[in-house]
Amino acid sequence: MRVQKAKTISGHKWNPTEKHWSFPDSDGTLEKILKVFEGEEIYIDPALKSATSKEKEILSPLAGGGKGEGYNFEDLRRELVSRKYSYKTGKGYIYYNRDFLIFINKEPSTITDNDIKDYLLYLAEEKEAATATLNQAINALKLYYGTMLKKKFLYEIKRPRKDKKLPIILSKEEVAKIISSVVNVKHKES
């Protein structure tokens, strides 16, 4: 039943390796998916959650033209593709740039270094983002604002310290238990 529903959405593709359906990222596709699967439990990537009216107001200049002075995420997407970034990395970069604009509620041309620092603080404190996540957000913002929009202040943004993880140290009993679980005598002698 769900397969037939998925096939009613134009551009549908089944990924046999990862066992999931994918659909084109175009206007109205998310709404079609939500309508077709209404009342059913489905997982939708958070980067694709439907835009609230506030998000639509902020993102409308990014759809091409308008108050956004020509800045749009299509330019970012094209830059990522031309640089041969992976699909997941590109999706992440677009997500963080969109999330950043929603967070600060400003036009891209009016962004300051304090806006970016506030966003990174928000990710670290409220979202409890890991160091790798913060670094990806920094990279995404640097590519868009630093490389594409030529903002100089971005290079002053400091990267977070790498998370320090203590090594797991096994007790003598745990080591003995691991060695005794080996059945091949040759491996026990090493």
Image: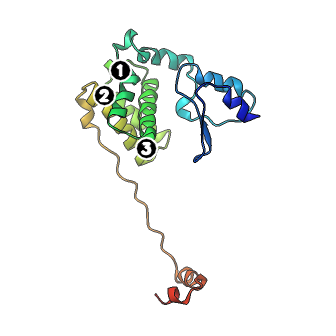
* Residue type pointed to by label 2: Tyr
**Tag 2–tag 3 contact (CB < 8 Å):** no
Residue under pointer 2: 145
Q: Nearer the viewer, residue 10 or 73?
A: 10
Q: In this view, does 168 lie above or below 109?
A: below
Judging from the image, what secondary structure is the residue with disc 2 in? helix
Which residue lies at the image location 49% right of the left edge and 44% below the top edge? 128
Identify the residue at image location x=34%, y=51%.
Answer: 161
Give the mark, 1 or 3, whose residue is nearer the N terminus: 1
Which of the 4 image quadrants contains residue 109?
Answer: top left
Q: Amino acid type of disc 3? A: Thr
Q: How far apart are marks 1 and 3 (CA)?
A: 22 Å
Q: Is residue 5 left or right of residue 15?
A: right
Residue tagged 1:
108
Vertical position of residue 180 compared to residue 10: above or below: below
Q: Where is residue 131 in the image (x, y as percent from the top left)?
A: 41, 48
Which residue is the site of mark 3? 133
- In this picture, residue 97 sits left or right of residue 10: left
